[in-house]
Amino acid sequence: TAHPEPSIISVGKGATAAKFGGGHIGMIAGPCAIESEERLDEIAGAIKAAGATVLRGGAYKPRTSPYSFQGLGDEGLKVLRRVGDKHGLPVVTEAIDPRHVELVAEWSDMIQLGARNMQNFVLLTEVGKTNKPVLLKRGMAATVKDMMMSAEYILSQGNPNVVLCERGVKGFDNACRNMFDVAAVPQVHALSHLPVIVDPSHATGRPELIPPCALAGVAAGADGVHIEVHSCPEEAMSDGPQALLPEQYAELCQQIKKVAEAIGKTI
Ligand code: PEP
Ligand code: MN
């Protein structure tokens, strides 16, 4: 079906703004959780040098177990802002509660809605009332059309700045954390003007599978790549086993640039 020209979503302000869509590939990277200012600073410096354009990090973590690290909370938002500004990187972080949306919108450049909240309609409506770019991740058992309808909840409130994210869906094979559905990328492009990015970190949960899946995503037309990077994965407070080391991320960025150039896109 016919739809408007691809949307280009800008994240951040001025010269360091990152773009997603319409030939622009946004490069989101960072740790799963914000753990300390020193650690985040070290990771941010490395990913910026590698070619990242947006710094990620969770302040409020949606953890499977209530006994796992839940994030630094409000203080984490401020740490993320300071570190992002220091390195010239716009920042994205997750809101898990409608009551946090105002604060997350104030301290970050993009609001992430996680897989577990893709159909939290109260939360979708709340971020729809802001004008911040939103990173909407696919639910772990959601169809592509379900994801599109969740995006509509945001758009219908007046916020047109939505970037979708394929992050894998529940499968039968527990060799991987999830099943990476690369076909979601061209499906979204056929249905919508919205940008769609890939997150091979949560899709596979296995560092050695991240580079090939990232490259497949870009080759399939993804408007961005979201990757978890940690300078010391064995000390990470969440998702350490799936983190790429900064040097692995740097090498992957070089490969992504080559694919992007071959298909006429820019990072
Ligand atoms: C994350 O990005 O750290 C995260 C929790 O991802 P997802 O919502 O896709 O599981
Ligand atoms: Mn994570």
Image (spheres, rainbow, N blue to C red):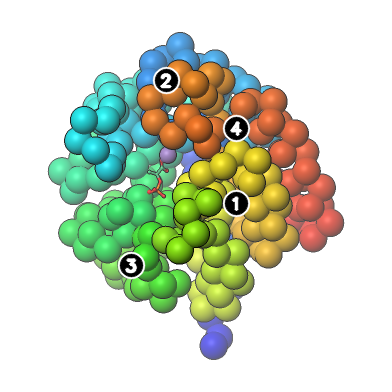
Percent across and percent down for residue 191 are 52, 78
Nearest to N terminus: mark 1 or mark 2:
2
**Rendering coords of residue 167 (x, y %):** 48, 55
- Residue 169 is marked as none
Q: Nearer the viewer, residue 109 or 240?
A: 240
Name the N-terminal-most of marks 4 and 2: 2
Residue 76 visible in rendering:
yes
State the residue at coordinates (28%, 55%).
117
Q: Find residue 185 and report its horizontal and vertical position in percent.
A: 58, 66
Residue 40 in view: no
Mark nearer the viewer, 3 or 2: 3
Check residue 224 in the rendering and tell me which mark sits there, or answer none: 1
Q: Residues within 10 Å of mark 2 (few under 14, many from 20)?
A: some
Left or right relative to 75: residue 91: right
Q: Which residue in the structure is indicated by mark 2?
A: 82
Q: Amino acid at mark 3?
A: Ser
Q: Residue at x 45, y 18 (%)?
A: 235
Residue wearing tag 4: 244
Q: Which mark is residue 150?
A: 3
Amino acid type indicated by mark 1: Gly
124 relative position to 46: left or right: left
Task: Please tell me whether mark 4 or mark 2 is closer to you in this view.
Answer: 4
- Cα separation, mark 1 vs mark 3, equals 20 Å
Q: Splitting the image into four quadrants, where does ligand 2 fall?
A: top left
Tell me how far mark 4 sits from mark 2, CA to CA: 23 Å
Q: Earlier in the sequence, mark 1 or mark 3?
A: 3
Disc with the residue nearer the chain's start (3 vs 2): 2
The alpha-carbon separation of the residues under discs 1 and 2 comes to 24 Å
